[in-house]
Image: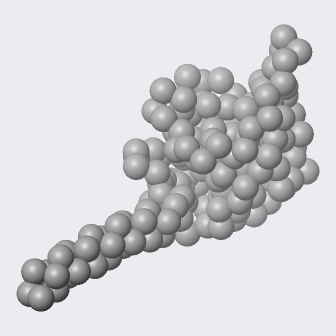
């Protein structure tokens, strides 16, 4: 009887550990395992840092978008991330007509206010349920209303143009 009780305790402990680990993973959704930093600059030149530690404070949204490439091919992708407009609000940027989003290599794309405020414009953190790797840029600007040239990898800076 003592052996059966010991086996039951061990099995129950293993089940508890498995369940706790699974719940912990779900509660950390939206927190990337790699660190990253994006500077957000308003029209007065005030810079605010937005990092992987700030992102969980915003609502994660899911966007299904078609990535249209220059060669005419298209890929439907399921992204999860934070709305670009929410990031701006979080960083204190309230007024803008035009923004520029810049990659770490200096590539920049300007977006008008209607595109920025579109529910399909996000800073993507997860692609098809998987965290974006360092090789793929960690944080990607996803603009569902624009072609691949607007989908910036490794976003490093967002600033108000006007």
Is 103 rendered above or below residue 122? above
Which residue is at a point 46% across and 33% down the rendered structure image? Answer: 134
x, y (%) of residue 36? 45, 44
Asked whether the viewer can see residue 9, the reply is: yes
Is 18 rendered above or below residue 126? below
**In the image, farthest residue toward the left:** 2
User: Where, by quadrant of the figure, is residue 72 drawn?
Assistant: top right
Please indicate whether residue 139 sits to the left or right of residue 116 in the image: left
Which residue is at a point 65% across and 62% down the rendered structure image? Answer: 60
x, y (%) of residue 111? 82, 40
x, y (%) of residue 79? 69, 46
* Quadrant containing the N terminus in the rendered view: bottom left
**In the image, farthest residue toward the bottom:** 1
Which residue is at a point 35% across and 67% down the rendered structure image? Answer: 18
In this rendered view, identify the residue nearer to me: 102 or 147: 147
Please indicate whether residue 49 sits to the left or right of residue 157 in the image: left
Is 96 rendered above or below residue 36? below
Please indicate whether residue 148 sits to the left or right of residue 89 in the image: right
* Quadrant containing the C terminus in the rendered view: top right
Query: How many numbered dots are placed on residues in this image?
Result: 0
Asked whether the viewer can see residue 84, the reply is: no
């Amino acid at each position: 009887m003592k052996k059966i009780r010991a086996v039951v305790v061990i099995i129950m402990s293993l089940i508890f550990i498995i369940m706790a680990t699974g719940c912990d993973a779900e509660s950390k959704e939206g927190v990337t395992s790699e660190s990253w930093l994006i500077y957000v600059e308003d029209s007065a030149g005030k810079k605010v840092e937005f990092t992987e530690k700030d992102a969980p404070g915003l609502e994660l949204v899911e966007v299904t978008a078609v990535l249209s490439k220059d060669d005419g091919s298209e890929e439907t992708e399921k992204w999860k991330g934070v709305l670009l407009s929410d990031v701006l609000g979080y960083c204190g940027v309230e007024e803008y007509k035009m923004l520029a989003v810049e990659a770490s290599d200096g590539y920049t794309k300007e977006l008008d206010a209607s595109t920025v405020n579109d529910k399909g414009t996000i800073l993507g953190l997860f692609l098809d349920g998987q965290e974006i790797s360092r090789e793929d840029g960690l944080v990607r600007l996803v603009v569902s209303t624009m072609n691949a040239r607007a989908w910036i990898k490794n976003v490093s800076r967002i600033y108000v143009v006007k």
